[in-house]
Amino acid sequence: MSEIEIESRNLDLWYGSAQALKNITMAMPEKKVTAIIGPSGCGKSTFLRCINRMNDLVKDCRITGELLFEGTDVYGNSVDAVELRKKIGMVFQKPNPFPMSIYDNVAYGPRVHGLRNREELDRIVEESLKASALWNEVGDIPDRSAIDLSGGQQQRLCIARTLAVKPKVILFDEPCSALDPISTAKIEDLINTLKHDYTIVIVTHNMQQAARVSDHTAFFLLGELIEFGKTKQIFELPEKKSTEDYITGRFG
Amino acid sequence: MKTSERIIEILLFLSAATAVMIVALIIIFLVKEGLSVLVKVGIIDFCLGMKWNPIAIAGEPSYGIFPMIVASFYVAIGSLIIAVPLGLACAVFLAEIAPSWARSILKHAIELLVGIPSVILGFVGLVLLVPFIRDHLGGWGFSILAGSIILAIMALPRIISISDDAIRSVPREYKEASLALGATHWHTIRKVILPSARSGIVAAVILAMATSIGETMAVLMVVGNTPLLPAPIYDILDPVRPMTSNIVLEMSYATGDHASALFATGIVLFVVVALLNVISHKALKSRMGTRR
Protein backbone atom coordinates (compact mmCIF):
# COMPACT_ATOMS: atom_id res chain seq x y z
CA MET A 1 0.00 0.00 0.00
CA SER A 2 1.42 3.30 -1.01
CA GLU A 3 1.43 6.55 0.92
CA ILE A 4 -1.76 8.50 1.44
CA GLU A 5 -1.68 11.75 -0.53
CA ILE A 6 -5.14 13.16 0.11
CA GLU A 7 -7.36 12.35 3.01
CA SER A 8 -10.73 13.72 4.00
CA ARG A 9 -11.95 13.36 7.57
CA ASN A 10 -15.58 13.94 8.51
CA LEU A 11 -15.99 16.45 5.72
CA ASP A 12 -19.36 18.23 5.61
CA LEU A 13 -20.33 20.81 3.03
CA TRP A 14 -23.36 23.09 2.79
CA TYR A 15 -24.54 25.28 -0.04
CA GLY A 16 -26.53 27.79 1.97
CA SER A 17 -28.77 25.58 4.07
CA ALA A 18 -28.62 22.53 1.82
CA GLN A 19 -26.09 19.94 2.87
CA ALA A 20 -24.30 18.57 -0.18
CA LEU A 21 -21.69 16.38 1.49
CA LYS A 22 -22.22 14.41 4.67
CA ASN A 23 -19.38 13.19 6.81
CA ILE A 24 -17.05 12.08 4.05
CA THR A 25 -14.05 10.13 5.28
CA MET A 26 -11.76 8.55 2.73
CA ALA A 27 -8.07 8.39 1.81
CA MET A 28 -6.62 8.60 -1.65
CA PRO A 29 -3.22 6.95 -2.10
CA GLU A 30 -0.28 8.45 -3.92
CA LYS A 31 0.27 7.64 -7.61
CA LYS A 32 -2.92 5.67 -7.88
CA VAL A 33 -6.18 6.39 -9.63
CA THR A 34 -9.16 6.88 -7.38
CA ALA A 35 -12.53 6.96 -9.11
CA ILE A 36 -15.63 8.56 -7.64
CA ILE A 37 -18.88 7.23 -9.03
CA GLY A 38 -22.51 7.88 -8.25
CA PRO A 39 -25.71 9.22 -9.78
CA SER A 40 -26.09 12.89 -10.77
CA GLY A 41 -26.34 15.24 -7.83
CA CYS A 42 -24.69 12.83 -5.39
CA GLY A 43 -21.96 15.32 -4.54
CA LYS A 44 -19.07 13.66 -6.37
CA SER A 45 -18.04 16.79 -8.31
CA THR A 46 -18.58 18.89 -5.20
CA PHE A 47 -16.19 16.65 -3.31
CA LEU A 48 -13.63 16.85 -6.09
CA ARG A 49 -13.84 20.63 -6.05
CA CYS A 50 -13.14 20.66 -2.33
CA ILE A 51 -9.72 19.17 -2.91
CA ASN A 52 -8.35 22.14 -4.88
CA ARG A 53 -10.69 24.61 -3.16
CA MET A 54 -12.63 25.51 -6.31
CA ASN A 55 -15.68 25.74 -4.06
CA ASP A 56 -14.16 28.94 -2.70
CA LEU A 57 -15.74 30.61 -5.74
CA VAL A 58 -19.21 29.55 -4.69
CA LYS A 59 -21.05 31.97 -2.45
CA ASP A 60 -22.56 30.62 0.76
CA CYS A 61 -20.47 27.46 0.59
CA ARG A 62 -19.53 26.27 4.07
CA ILE A 63 -17.20 23.41 4.90
CA THR A 64 -16.41 21.66 8.16
CA GLY A 65 -14.14 18.74 8.89
CA GLU A 66 -10.67 18.21 7.54
CA LEU A 67 -9.24 17.73 4.09
CA LEU A 68 -5.58 16.84 4.28
CA PHE A 69 -3.16 17.16 1.39
CA GLU A 70 0.34 15.89 2.27
CA GLY A 71 -0.72 15.98 5.88
CA THR A 72 -1.87 19.62 5.96
CA ASP A 73 -5.49 20.73 6.11
CA VAL A 74 -6.11 22.62 2.85
CA TYR A 75 -8.71 24.72 4.64
CA GLY A 76 -6.20 25.72 7.32
CA ASN A 77 -5.45 29.40 7.84
CA SER A 78 -1.91 29.20 6.58
CA VAL A 79 -2.84 27.58 3.27
CA ASP A 80 -2.98 29.79 0.19
CA ALA A 81 -5.52 28.44 -2.30
CA VAL A 82 -3.43 29.80 -5.18
CA GLU A 83 -0.35 27.89 -4.04
CA LEU A 84 -2.46 24.79 -3.42
CA ARG A 85 -3.84 24.81 -6.96
CA LYS A 86 -0.32 24.76 -8.37
CA LYS A 87 0.11 21.37 -6.75
CA ILE A 88 -3.39 20.09 -7.45
CA GLY A 89 -4.34 20.53 -11.09
CA MET A 90 -7.81 20.09 -12.51
CA VAL A 91 -9.32 18.99 -15.81
CA PHE A 92 -12.93 20.00 -16.30
CA GLN A 93 -16.02 18.36 -17.69
CA LYS A 94 -16.22 20.55 -20.76
CA PRO A 95 -12.91 21.13 -22.55
CA ASN A 96 -12.10 24.73 -21.74
CA PRO A 97 -8.96 25.85 -23.52
CA PHE A 98 -8.40 29.60 -23.46
CA PRO A 99 -9.14 31.43 -26.71
CA MET A 100 -5.41 31.70 -27.42
CA SER A 101 -2.84 29.73 -29.40
CA ILE A 102 -2.02 26.14 -28.48
CA TYR A 103 1.39 27.26 -27.27
CA ASP A 104 0.03 30.06 -25.09
CA ASN A 105 -2.49 27.70 -23.54
CA VAL A 106 0.20 25.30 -22.36
CA ALA A 107 2.60 28.09 -21.42
CA TYR A 108 -0.09 29.92 -19.43
CA GLY A 109 0.57 28.14 -16.15
CA PRO A 110 4.37 28.40 -16.19
CA ARG A 111 4.03 32.08 -17.15
CA VAL A 112 1.61 32.65 -14.29
CA HIS A 113 4.30 31.35 -12.01
CA GLY A 114 6.85 33.74 -13.36
CA LEU A 115 8.71 31.77 -16.03
CA ARG A 116 9.82 34.05 -18.88
CA ASN A 117 12.74 32.19 -20.43
CA ARG A 118 11.67 31.26 -23.96
CA GLU A 119 13.80 28.13 -24.27
CA GLU A 120 12.60 26.81 -20.94
CA LEU A 121 8.99 27.52 -21.95
CA ASP A 122 9.51 25.77 -25.30
CA ARG A 123 10.84 22.76 -23.46
CA ILE A 124 7.93 22.62 -21.03
CA VAL A 125 5.36 23.05 -23.79
CA GLU A 126 6.94 20.22 -25.80
CA GLU A 127 7.20 17.94 -22.77
CA SER A 128 3.62 18.60 -21.73
CA LEU A 129 2.21 18.07 -25.20
CA LYS A 130 4.16 14.83 -25.48
CA ALA A 131 2.98 13.66 -22.08
CA SER A 132 -0.61 14.33 -23.09
CA ALA A 133 -0.17 12.46 -26.39
CA LEU A 134 -0.91 15.57 -28.40
CA TRP A 135 2.56 16.41 -29.69
CA ASN A 136 2.25 14.31 -32.86
CA GLU A 137 -0.95 16.09 -33.79
CA VAL A 138 -0.15 19.72 -32.93
CA GLY A 139 3.64 19.85 -32.48
CA ASP A 140 4.06 21.64 -35.80
CA ILE A 141 1.14 24.06 -35.38
CA PRO A 142 1.69 25.60 -31.92
CA ASP A 143 0.48 29.00 -33.11
CA ARG A 144 -2.93 27.72 -34.25
CA SER A 145 -5.86 28.78 -32.09
CA ALA A 146 -6.82 26.16 -29.53
CA ILE A 147 -10.47 26.77 -30.37
CA ASP A 148 -9.94 25.15 -33.81
CA LEU A 149 -8.98 21.79 -32.31
CA SER A 150 -11.48 18.93 -32.00
CA GLY A 151 -13.16 18.31 -28.63
CA GLY A 152 -10.88 15.40 -27.77
CA GLN A 153 -7.79 17.36 -28.76
CA GLN A 154 -9.00 20.31 -26.69
CA GLN A 155 -9.39 18.07 -23.67
CA ARG A 156 -5.90 16.64 -24.11
CA LEU A 157 -4.65 20.22 -24.48
CA CYS A 158 -6.29 21.02 -21.15
CA ILE A 159 -4.44 18.06 -19.67
CA ALA A 160 -1.17 19.32 -21.19
CA ARG A 161 -1.91 22.75 -19.74
CA THR A 162 -2.35 21.18 -16.32
CA LEU A 163 0.81 19.08 -16.63
CA ALA A 164 2.86 22.16 -17.53
CA VAL A 165 2.42 23.46 -13.99
CA LYS A 166 4.00 20.23 -12.69
CA PRO A 167 1.30 19.36 -10.16
CA LYS A 168 1.39 16.36 -7.86
CA VAL A 169 -2.27 15.58 -8.14
CA ILE A 170 -4.61 15.83 -11.11
CA LEU A 171 -8.35 15.99 -10.55
CA PHE A 172 -10.53 14.93 -13.47
CA ASP A 173 -14.14 16.09 -13.35
CA GLU A 174 -15.99 13.81 -15.79
CA PRO A 175 -13.33 14.51 -18.43
CA CYS A 176 -14.92 12.40 -21.15
CA SER A 177 -18.58 13.24 -20.79
CA ALA A 178 -18.45 15.63 -23.76
CA LEU A 179 -16.28 13.37 -25.93
CA ASP A 180 -16.78 10.62 -28.52
CA PRO A 181 -15.69 7.01 -27.76
CA ILE A 182 -12.37 7.25 -29.63
CA SER A 183 -11.35 10.44 -27.82
CA THR A 184 -12.51 8.86 -24.59
CA ALA A 185 -10.26 5.84 -25.16
CA LYS A 186 -7.32 8.16 -25.75
CA ILE A 187 -7.95 10.02 -22.51
CA GLU A 188 -8.26 6.76 -20.61
CA ASP A 189 -4.96 5.51 -22.06
CA LEU A 190 -3.46 8.80 -20.99
CA ILE A 191 -4.73 8.42 -17.44
CA ASN A 192 -3.21 4.96 -17.28
CA THR A 193 0.17 6.43 -18.27
CA LEU A 194 -0.09 9.49 -16.05
CA LYS A 195 -0.73 7.50 -12.90
CA HIS A 196 2.93 6.48 -12.81
CA ASP A 197 3.82 10.08 -12.03
CA TYR A 198 0.70 11.65 -10.58
CA THR A 199 -1.97 10.97 -8.03
CA ILE A 200 -5.24 10.98 -9.91
CA VAL A 201 -8.80 11.44 -8.72
CA ILE A 202 -11.45 11.05 -11.38
CA VAL A 203 -15.16 11.70 -11.13
CA THR A 204 -17.14 9.78 -13.68
CA HIS A 205 -20.69 8.66 -14.27
CA ASN A 206 -19.44 5.99 -16.61
CA MET A 207 -18.98 2.84 -14.53
CA GLN A 208 -17.04 0.95 -17.17
CA GLN A 209 -14.63 3.84 -17.23
CA ALA A 210 -14.17 3.68 -13.47
CA ALA A 211 -13.60 -0.06 -13.71
CA ARG A 212 -11.08 0.37 -16.52
CA VAL A 213 -8.91 3.16 -15.18
CA SER A 214 -9.06 3.16 -11.41
CA ASP A 215 -7.32 1.33 -8.58
CA HIS A 216 -9.81 2.42 -5.95
CA THR A 217 -13.42 3.39 -6.27
CA ALA A 218 -15.70 5.43 -4.05
CA PHE A 219 -19.45 5.27 -4.44
CA PHE A 220 -21.37 8.39 -3.47
CA LEU A 221 -25.11 8.63 -2.99
CA LEU A 222 -27.07 11.70 -1.90
CA GLY A 223 -24.00 13.38 -0.42
CA GLU A 224 -22.84 10.34 1.48
CA LEU A 225 -19.93 8.02 0.88
CA ILE A 226 -21.60 4.64 0.72
CA GLU A 227 -18.64 2.46 -0.02
CA PHE A 228 -14.94 2.87 -0.71
CA GLY A 229 -12.44 0.17 -1.59
CA LYS A 230 -10.35 -1.51 -4.26
CA THR A 231 -12.03 -1.15 -7.61
CA LYS A 232 -12.06 -4.88 -8.18
CA GLN A 233 -13.79 -5.46 -4.88
CA ILE A 234 -16.36 -2.69 -5.41
CA PHE A 235 -17.35 -4.04 -8.80
CA GLU A 236 -17.19 -7.74 -8.02
CA LEU A 237 -18.10 -8.01 -4.36
CA PRO A 238 -19.82 -4.82 -3.24
CA GLU A 239 -20.62 -4.88 0.44
CA LYS A 240 -23.62 -2.58 0.35
CA LYS A 241 -26.89 -3.24 -1.38
CA SER A 242 -27.14 0.23 -2.93
CA THR A 243 -23.63 -0.06 -4.43
CA GLU A 244 -24.59 -3.30 -6.07
CA ASP A 245 -27.86 -1.82 -7.32
CA TYR A 246 -26.05 1.13 -8.83
CA ILE A 247 -23.26 -0.74 -10.58
CA THR A 248 -25.63 -3.34 -11.95
CA GLY A 249 -27.65 -0.50 -13.39
CA ARG A 250 -30.76 -0.86 -11.27
CA PHE A 251 -30.81 2.92 -10.81
CA GLY A 252 -28.62 5.82 -11.83
CA MET B 1 -54.59 34.17 -42.58
CA LYS B 2 -57.22 36.07 -40.64
CA THR B 3 -57.80 39.67 -41.64
CA SER B 4 -57.14 40.95 -38.13
CA GLU B 5 -53.72 39.24 -38.13
CA ARG B 6 -52.99 40.81 -41.49
CA ILE B 7 -53.91 44.29 -40.27
CA ILE B 8 -51.72 43.95 -37.19
CA GLU B 9 -48.79 42.86 -39.32
CA ILE B 10 -49.24 45.81 -41.63
CA LEU B 11 -49.40 48.21 -38.67
CA LEU B 12 -46.23 46.74 -37.22
CA PHE B 13 -44.49 47.03 -40.56
CA LEU B 14 -45.55 50.67 -40.85
CA SER B 15 -44.16 51.45 -37.40
CA ALA B 16 -40.87 49.85 -38.34
CA ALA B 17 -40.82 51.70 -41.63
CA THR B 18 -41.42 55.01 -39.87
CA ALA B 19 -38.08 54.78 -38.07
CA VAL B 20 -36.27 54.20 -41.35
CA MET B 21 -38.21 56.98 -43.05
CA ILE B 22 -37.33 59.48 -40.35
CA VAL B 23 -33.63 58.73 -40.67
CA ALA B 24 -33.87 59.01 -44.43
CA LEU B 25 -35.76 62.30 -44.20
CA ILE B 26 -33.20 63.78 -41.84
CA ILE B 27 -30.37 62.82 -44.16
CA ILE B 28 -32.18 64.23 -47.18
CA PHE B 29 -32.99 67.43 -45.35
CA LEU B 30 -29.43 67.88 -44.07
CA VAL B 31 -27.94 67.33 -47.51
CA LYS B 32 -30.47 69.56 -49.23
CA GLU B 33 -29.79 72.45 -46.86
CA GLY B 34 -26.06 71.99 -46.49
CA LEU B 35 -25.06 71.02 -50.01
CA SER B 36 -25.03 74.55 -51.48
CA VAL B 37 -22.16 75.70 -49.25
CA LEU B 38 -20.26 72.44 -49.69
CA VAL B 39 -20.44 72.94 -53.45
CA LYS B 40 -19.60 76.64 -53.28
CA VAL B 41 -16.63 76.31 -50.92
CA GLY B 42 -15.64 72.77 -51.78
CA ILE B 43 -15.76 69.87 -49.33
CA ILE B 44 -12.03 69.93 -48.74
CA ASP B 45 -11.82 73.67 -48.13
CA PHE B 46 -14.86 73.48 -45.88
CA CYS B 47 -13.45 70.67 -43.76
CA LEU B 48 -9.85 71.82 -43.73
CA GLY B 49 -10.39 75.59 -43.79
CA MET B 50 -8.89 77.33 -40.79
CA LYS B 51 -11.07 80.40 -40.71
CA TRP B 52 -14.69 80.60 -39.66
CA ASN B 53 -16.00 84.08 -40.43
CA PRO B 54 -19.58 83.72 -41.63
CA ILE B 55 -20.64 87.35 -41.31
CA ALA B 56 -17.85 89.35 -42.87
CA ILE B 57 -18.26 93.09 -42.42
CA ALA B 58 -15.69 93.73 -45.09
CA GLY B 59 -14.69 91.25 -47.80
CA GLU B 60 -15.88 87.69 -48.40
CA PRO B 61 -17.23 85.50 -45.58
CA SER B 62 -15.21 82.32 -45.00
CA TYR B 63 -16.47 78.94 -43.93
CA GLY B 64 -13.70 76.70 -42.60
CA ILE B 65 -14.56 74.26 -39.83
CA PHE B 66 -11.24 72.53 -39.33
CA PRO B 67 -10.69 74.03 -35.85
CA MET B 68 -14.13 72.76 -34.86
CA ILE B 69 -13.54 69.24 -36.16
CA VAL B 70 -10.31 69.22 -34.19
CA ALA B 71 -12.14 70.59 -31.15
CA SER B 72 -14.81 67.89 -31.33
CA PHE B 73 -12.21 65.13 -31.46
CA TYR B 74 -10.11 66.87 -28.83
CA VAL B 75 -12.80 67.01 -26.17
CA ALA B 76 -14.11 63.54 -27.06
CA ILE B 77 -10.70 61.87 -26.91
CA GLY B 78 -9.89 63.84 -23.77
CA SER B 79 -13.05 62.51 -22.18
CA LEU B 80 -12.08 58.94 -23.13
CA ILE B 81 -8.64 59.35 -21.59
CA ILE B 82 -10.37 60.15 -18.32
CA ALA B 83 -13.38 57.85 -18.58
CA VAL B 84 -11.89 54.64 -20.03
CA PRO B 85 -9.48 53.74 -17.21
CA LEU B 86 -12.02 54.76 -14.59
CA GLY B 87 -14.92 53.04 -16.31
CA LEU B 88 -13.00 49.86 -16.99
CA ALA B 89 -11.79 49.65 -13.40
CA CYS B 90 -15.35 50.15 -12.23
CA ALA B 91 -16.65 47.48 -14.63
CA VAL B 92 -14.05 44.97 -13.44
CA PHE B 93 -14.99 45.71 -9.86
CA LEU B 94 -18.68 45.33 -10.65
CA ALA B 95 -18.38 42.14 -12.65
CA GLU B 96 -15.67 40.32 -10.74
CA ILE B 97 -15.19 41.61 -7.25
CA ALA B 98 -18.22 43.44 -5.86
CA PRO B 99 -20.48 41.48 -3.51
CA SER B 100 -24.09 41.58 -4.63
CA TRP B 101 -25.12 44.41 -2.29
CA ALA B 102 -22.28 46.66 -3.52
CA ARG B 103 -23.13 45.73 -7.07
CA SER B 104 -26.73 46.79 -6.67
CA ILE B 105 -25.77 50.11 -5.05
CA LEU B 106 -23.28 50.86 -7.83
CA LYS B 107 -25.71 49.84 -10.55
CA HIS B 108 -28.33 52.20 -9.17
CA ALA B 109 -25.83 55.03 -8.83
CA ILE B 110 -24.81 54.56 -12.44
CA GLU B 111 -28.42 54.58 -13.60
CA LEU B 112 -28.89 57.82 -11.71
CA LEU B 113 -25.87 59.27 -13.46
CA VAL B 114 -27.44 58.45 -16.83
CA GLY B 115 -30.58 60.26 -15.76
CA ILE B 116 -28.93 63.62 -15.05
CA PRO B 117 -29.94 66.02 -17.82
CA SER B 118 -26.89 67.24 -19.70
CA VAL B 119 -27.78 70.88 -19.05
CA ILE B 120 -27.45 70.26 -15.32
CA LEU B 121 -24.03 68.69 -15.77
CA GLY B 122 -23.09 71.70 -17.89
CA PHE B 123 -24.35 74.03 -15.21
CA VAL B 124 -22.36 72.27 -12.52
CA GLY B 125 -19.33 72.44 -14.79
CA LEU B 126 -19.89 76.15 -15.34
CA VAL B 127 -20.26 76.96 -11.67
CA LEU B 128 -17.72 74.58 -10.14
CA LEU B 129 -15.31 73.22 -12.72
CA VAL B 130 -14.59 76.32 -14.78
CA PRO B 131 -13.68 78.55 -11.80
CA PHE B 132 -11.67 75.69 -10.30
CA ILE B 133 -9.59 75.32 -13.46
CA ARG B 134 -9.18 79.09 -13.73
CA ASP B 135 -7.98 79.42 -10.16
CA HIS B 136 -5.78 76.36 -9.90
CA LEU B 137 -4.50 75.56 -13.39
CA GLY B 138 -4.63 78.93 -15.06
CA GLY B 139 -6.14 80.13 -18.31
CA TRP B 140 -9.68 81.28 -18.76
CA GLY B 141 -11.28 78.23 -17.20
CA PHE B 142 -13.49 77.61 -20.22
CA SER B 143 -11.36 74.98 -21.86
CA ILE B 144 -10.84 71.63 -23.55
CA LEU B 145 -10.08 70.22 -20.13
CA ALA B 146 -13.40 71.35 -18.68
CA GLY B 147 -15.28 69.93 -21.68
CA SER B 148 -13.42 66.65 -21.45
CA ILE B 149 -14.16 66.23 -17.77
CA ILE B 150 -17.88 66.91 -18.20
CA LEU B 151 -18.03 64.54 -21.18
CA ALA B 152 -16.13 61.91 -19.22
CA ILE B 153 -18.80 62.01 -16.54
CA MET B 154 -21.43 61.50 -19.21
CA ALA B 155 -19.49 58.70 -20.91
CA LEU B 156 -18.77 56.78 -17.72
CA PRO B 157 -22.12 55.00 -17.32
CA ARG B 158 -22.12 53.81 -20.92
CA ILE B 159 -18.54 52.51 -20.73
CA ILE B 160 -19.21 50.84 -17.40
CA SER B 161 -22.42 49.08 -18.34
CA ILE B 162 -21.27 47.79 -21.76
CA SER B 163 -17.88 46.67 -20.38
CA ASP B 164 -19.63 45.05 -17.42
CA ASP B 165 -21.82 43.07 -19.83
CA ALA B 166 -18.79 42.10 -21.91
CA ILE B 167 -16.86 40.91 -18.86
CA ARG B 168 -19.81 38.99 -17.47
CA SER B 169 -20.36 37.20 -20.75
CA VAL B 170 -16.85 35.72 -20.68
CA PRO B 171 -17.46 31.99 -20.16
CA ARG B 172 -17.09 30.95 -16.54
CA GLU B 173 -15.00 27.99 -17.70
CA TYR B 174 -12.14 30.30 -18.71
CA LYS B 175 -12.01 31.78 -15.25
CA GLU B 176 -12.13 28.39 -13.58
CA ALA B 177 -9.40 27.01 -15.84
CA SER B 178 -7.12 29.90 -15.00
CA LEU B 179 -7.72 29.69 -11.27
CA ALA B 180 -7.25 25.92 -11.30
CA LEU B 181 -3.79 26.48 -12.78
CA GLY B 182 -2.83 28.45 -9.72
CA ALA B 183 -3.32 31.93 -11.19
CA THR B 184 -4.45 34.67 -8.84
CA HIS B 185 -7.79 36.37 -9.41
CA TRP B 186 -6.07 39.56 -10.60
CA HIS B 187 -3.85 37.63 -13.00
CA THR B 188 -6.94 35.84 -14.33
CA ILE B 189 -8.69 39.16 -14.86
CA ARG B 190 -5.73 40.64 -16.71
CA LYS B 191 -4.68 37.71 -18.84
CA VAL B 192 -7.90 35.82 -19.52
CA ILE B 193 -11.03 37.78 -18.71
CA LEU B 194 -10.17 41.21 -20.11
CA PRO B 195 -8.63 39.82 -23.34
CA SER B 196 -11.74 37.69 -23.87
CA ALA B 197 -13.97 40.71 -23.32
CA ARG B 198 -11.78 42.95 -25.46
CA SER B 199 -14.07 43.46 -28.45
CA GLY B 200 -17.02 44.35 -26.24
CA ILE B 201 -14.90 46.86 -24.39
CA VAL B 202 -13.63 48.36 -27.65
CA ALA B 203 -17.23 48.71 -28.81
CA ALA B 204 -18.11 50.47 -25.57
CA VAL B 205 -15.26 52.92 -25.99
CA ILE B 206 -16.08 53.76 -29.59
CA LEU B 207 -19.76 54.16 -28.81
CA ALA B 208 -18.84 56.46 -25.94
CA MET B 209 -16.71 58.49 -28.32
CA ALA B 210 -19.58 58.79 -30.79
CA THR B 211 -21.92 60.11 -28.12
CA SER B 212 -19.23 62.44 -26.78
CA ILE B 213 -18.74 63.97 -30.22
CA GLY B 214 -22.48 64.41 -30.60
CA GLU B 215 -23.06 65.86 -27.14
CA THR B 216 -24.00 69.51 -27.22
CA MET B 217 -25.43 71.31 -24.24
CA ALA B 218 -23.06 70.38 -21.43
CA VAL B 219 -20.03 70.95 -23.62
CA LEU B 220 -21.27 74.25 -24.96
CA MET B 221 -21.49 75.64 -21.45
CA VAL B 222 -17.88 74.95 -20.48
CA VAL B 223 -15.60 74.95 -23.54
CA GLY B 224 -15.53 78.68 -24.27
CA ASN B 225 -16.56 78.35 -27.93
CA THR B 226 -13.84 80.31 -29.72
CA PRO B 227 -13.65 78.98 -33.27
CA LEU B 228 -9.87 78.69 -33.29
CA LEU B 229 -7.34 75.91 -32.85
CA PRO B 230 -5.82 75.87 -29.38
CA ALA B 231 -2.46 77.64 -29.36
CA PRO B 232 -0.13 75.94 -28.85
CA ILE B 233 -2.02 72.97 -30.25
CA TYR B 234 -1.54 70.84 -27.13
CA ASP B 235 -2.81 73.48 -24.71
CA ILE B 236 -5.78 71.82 -23.08
CA LEU B 237 -6.53 74.93 -21.06
CA ASP B 238 -7.45 76.85 -24.22
CA PRO B 239 -11.09 77.36 -25.18
CA VAL B 240 -12.36 75.69 -28.36
CA ARG B 241 -15.63 75.35 -30.26
CA PRO B 242 -16.81 71.83 -31.15
CA MET B 243 -19.07 71.33 -34.19
CA THR B 244 -22.18 70.88 -32.09
CA SER B 245 -21.68 74.19 -30.28
CA ASN B 246 -21.13 75.92 -33.58
CA ILE B 247 -24.57 74.91 -34.80
CA VAL B 248 -26.39 75.84 -31.59
CA LEU B 249 -24.66 79.18 -31.12
CA GLU B 250 -25.34 80.58 -34.56
CA MET B 251 -28.48 78.96 -35.87
CA SER B 252 -30.83 81.54 -34.37
CA TYR B 253 -29.55 84.33 -36.58
CA ALA B 254 -27.97 82.58 -39.54
CA THR B 255 -29.36 83.14 -43.04
CA GLY B 256 -28.38 82.19 -46.57
CA ASP B 257 -24.94 80.68 -47.00
CA HIS B 258 -24.30 81.01 -43.29
CA ALA B 259 -27.31 78.83 -42.43
CA SER B 260 -26.28 76.38 -45.11
CA ALA B 261 -22.78 76.22 -43.61
CA LEU B 262 -24.30 75.25 -40.27
CA PHE B 263 -26.21 72.43 -41.94
CA ALA B 264 -23.02 71.37 -43.65
CA THR B 265 -21.37 71.24 -40.22
CA GLY B 266 -24.24 68.98 -39.26
CA ILE B 267 -23.49 66.71 -42.23
CA VAL B 268 -19.85 66.35 -41.18
CA LEU B 269 -20.93 65.62 -37.61
CA PHE B 270 -23.47 63.07 -38.80
CA VAL B 271 -20.91 61.26 -40.96
CA VAL B 272 -18.35 61.13 -38.14
CA VAL B 273 -20.85 59.77 -35.62
CA ALA B 274 -22.28 57.27 -38.13
CA LEU B 275 -18.80 55.98 -38.92
CA LEU B 276 -18.01 55.52 -35.24
CA ASN B 277 -21.28 53.66 -34.73
CA VAL B 278 -20.51 51.32 -37.61
CA ILE B 279 -17.05 50.58 -36.20
CA SER B 280 -18.54 49.92 -32.78
CA HIS B 281 -21.11 47.48 -34.21
CA LYS B 282 -18.37 45.71 -36.15
CA ALA B 283 -16.42 45.28 -32.92
CA LEU B 284 -19.45 43.85 -31.13
CA LYS B 285 -20.17 41.48 -34.01
CA SER B 286 -16.65 40.10 -33.98
CA ARG B 287 -17.13 39.35 -30.30
CA MET B 288 -20.23 37.32 -31.09
CA GLY B 289 -18.16 35.48 -33.67
CA THR B 290 -15.54 34.33 -31.20
CA ARG B 291 -17.98 33.35 -28.51
CA ARG B 292 -18.97 30.05 -30.08
Image (cartoon, helix red, strand yellow):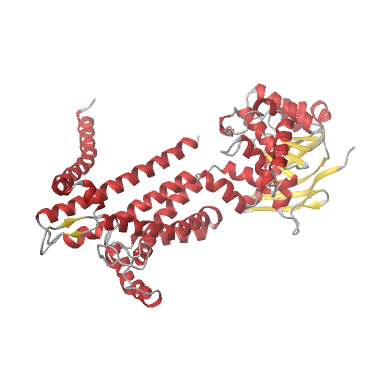
Q: Residue furthest top?
A: A182
Residue A41 seen in the figure: no
Q: Within the image, what quadrant is residue A143 found in?
A: top right
User: Could you tell me residue A199's position as x and y percent?
Assistant: 79, 38
Residue A28 seen in the figure: yes
Name the residue at 10% across, 64% down.
B57
Q: Quadrant of the N terminus of chain A?
A: top right
Q: Nearer the viewer, residue B195 or B292?
A: B195
User: Could you tell me residue A164's position as x and y percent?
Assistant: 71, 40
Q: Within the image, what quadrant is residue B53 found in?
A: bottom left
User: Could you tell me residue B114's position as x and y percent?
Assistant: 36, 59
User: Could you tell me residue B11's position as x and y percent?
Assistant: 20, 36
Residue B182 vertical position relative to residue A32 in the rendered view, above or below: below
Q: Nearer the viewer, residue B34 or B173?
A: B34
Label total for image: 0
Name the residue at 33% across, 53% down.
B211
Q: Nearer the viewer, residue B239 or A248?
A: B239
Name the residue at 69% across, 50% down.
A114
User: Going by the image, does B93 lie left or right of B137?
Assistant: right
Q: Nearer the viewer, residue B242 or A168?
A: B242
Name the residue at 85% across, 43% down.
A4
Q: Within the image, what quadrant is residue A46 found in?
A: top right
User: Going by the image, does B218 lie left or right of A117?
Assistant: left
